[in-house]
Image: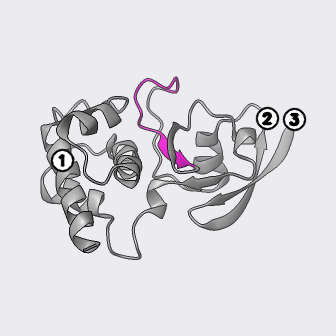
Amino acid sequence: MRIIVSAEVNSEARQAIVDTRDTLLVLLREGLGLTGTKEGCSNGNCGTCTVLVEDEPVCSCLMLAAEAEGARITTIEGIAQGNTLHPVQAALVALGGTQCGYCTPGIVMSAVALLARNPAPNEHEIRHAIAGNLCRCTGYDKIVCAIEAAAETIAGAST
């Protein structure tokens, strides 16, 4: 059976027709053409498909599209301001926190959520926040340093 799902995606009212068995990931990628969110494991173990639903990180492969009805969703495409990268994105690029880049959208979304609720996290809090995001390339140290740098950038911008 097919249904129409309406949600606010990246601050824009959007609708898509999906099968009732489709996940939020399918809605975003196939229904709305937002391919920045990547599919990794399809069972919630890798975090590659992380998006924000009502500002909370969610594995979009585990959430049914129908559950997104009326929700406020932010994907990787929705965090930059025009051509200006979000501080987390900019820090990951500047500090070499990306390699193959496949895990990067999910890590960015987890980090954005962390910094929204805790603007000055310590290393332990950062590692805990991204624990559900697997990266096979970097070893995480540069990712953690980048998130720390992004926190400093955000704090400096708000003073």
Residue holding disc 3: 1
Q: How crowded is the residue under tag 2: few (<14 C-alpha within 10 Å), some, or many (20+)? A: some
In the rendered image, the residue lying farthest to the front is 159
Q: Do the residues labelled 3 and 1 touch (CB within 8 Å)?
A: no
Residue holding disc 2: 20
How many labels were placed on the picture?
3
Mark 2 to mark 1 CA distance (whole Å): 37 Å
| Residue 33 point in image, percent of width and height | 59, 56
Q: How crowded is the residue under tag 1: few (<14 C-alpha within 10 Å), some, or many (20+)? A: many
SS assignment at label 3: loop
Report the span colored magenta.
42-53
Q: Are marks 2 and 1 in contact (CB under 8 Å)?
A: no
Residue 104: in sight, yes or no? yes
SS assignment at label 1: loop
- Dot 3 or dot 1, earlier in sequence: 3
Q: Which residue is drawn at 44% across and 32% down?
A: 40
Residue 97, labelled with which disc?
1
Task: Tell me the kind of residue under disc 1.
Answer: Gly
Q: Do the residues labelled 2 and 3 touch (CB within 8 Å)?
A: yes
